[in-house]
Amino acid sequence: TDDLNLETTHVVAESPGSAKYRVACERQTPIVLPRWVRESARVGHALDPAPYVLPALHGTCVTVTGAAFDEKRARDAARSLVERLGGAFSSQLHGGVTHLVAGGDARASTKLAAAREDPSFRGVRAVSADWLCACARARHWLPECDFPPLPPGAG
């Protein structure tokens, strides 16, 4: 982040979460996809960055688990939110899933147990449903560590 200073007008990133991304979010500096640079160079001037803003969940694949998602309507709402934030949604836990969102009481969740215990799911980040809502409100990715999948002492 040494080269991200107060004169920085845009940060170019392909995915959320880097140190520069986090500083840019704090400073409310626009974070754009590399395509913005290419298209701006092609036309010879800086384009409006709005259509090129890096979506909050760009590059993620999310699945859900827990009592809060037992009803189809709740799963559909989660799917819609994930897709609106630029992520992909899966109804199943598989090797391409990056995030497992736990809603309600997820202590008995086989998906959560697999994400914690099965080495093939080691890269899956388990978070509470609050993470999705907070990312939507903030309009950018937020650190998963601030949103544990189960309340303290629950699991």
Image (tube, rainbow, N blue to C red):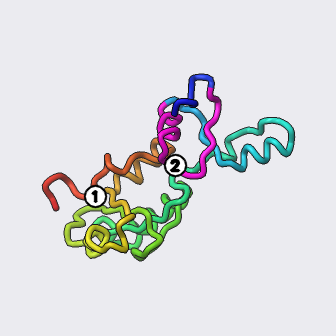
Q: Please tell me whether residue 10 belongs to the stretch shown in magenta.
A: yes
The residue positioned 28% from the left and 53% from the top of the image is 148
Pinpoint residue 32: horizontal percent, then vertical percent: 64, 44
Q: Which mark sits nearer the N-terminus, 1 or 2?
A: 2
Using a 10 Å C-alpha cutoff, classify the residue at mark 1 as few (fewer than 14 neighbours), some (14 to 19) or many (20 or more).
many
The residue positioned 86% from the left and 42% from the top of the image is 43
Pinpoint residue 48: horizontal percent, then vertical percent: 74, 38
Q: Which residue lies furthest to the top in this view?
A: 6
58 vs 50: above or below: below
Identify which residue, 101 or 95, lies in the foreground: 95
**In this rendering, would 68 be left or right of 84?**
left
Mark linked to residue 59? none
SS at circle 1: loop
Q: Indicate the quadrant where residue 31 lies.
A: top right
**In this rendering, would 112 be left or right of 91?**
left
Q: Which circle, 1 or 2, is nearer the viewer?
A: 2
Q: Which residue lies furthest to the left in this view?
A: 153
**In this rendering, would 123 be left or right of 38?**
left
User: Taking the image as drawn, is residue 66 in sight?
Assistant: no
23 vs 63: above or below: above
Pinpoint residue 116: horizontal percent, then vertical percent: 27, 67
Mark linked to residue 16? 2
Tell me the residue that label 1 is attached to: 149
Which residues are the magenta region? 8-26
Q: What residue type is labelled 2?
A: Pro
Pinpoint residue 1: horizontal percent, then vertical percent: 51, 34
Using a 10 Å C-alpha cutoff, classify the residue at mark 2 as few (fewer than 14 neighbours), some (14 to 19) or many (20 or more).
many
**In this rendering, would 74 be left or right of 13?**
left
CA gap between label 1 and label 2 equals 20 Å
Q: Indicate the quadrant where residue 42 lies.
A: top right
The residue positioned 23% from the left and 58% from the top of the image is 150
Q: Please tell me whether residue 154 belongs to the stretch shown in magenta.
A: no
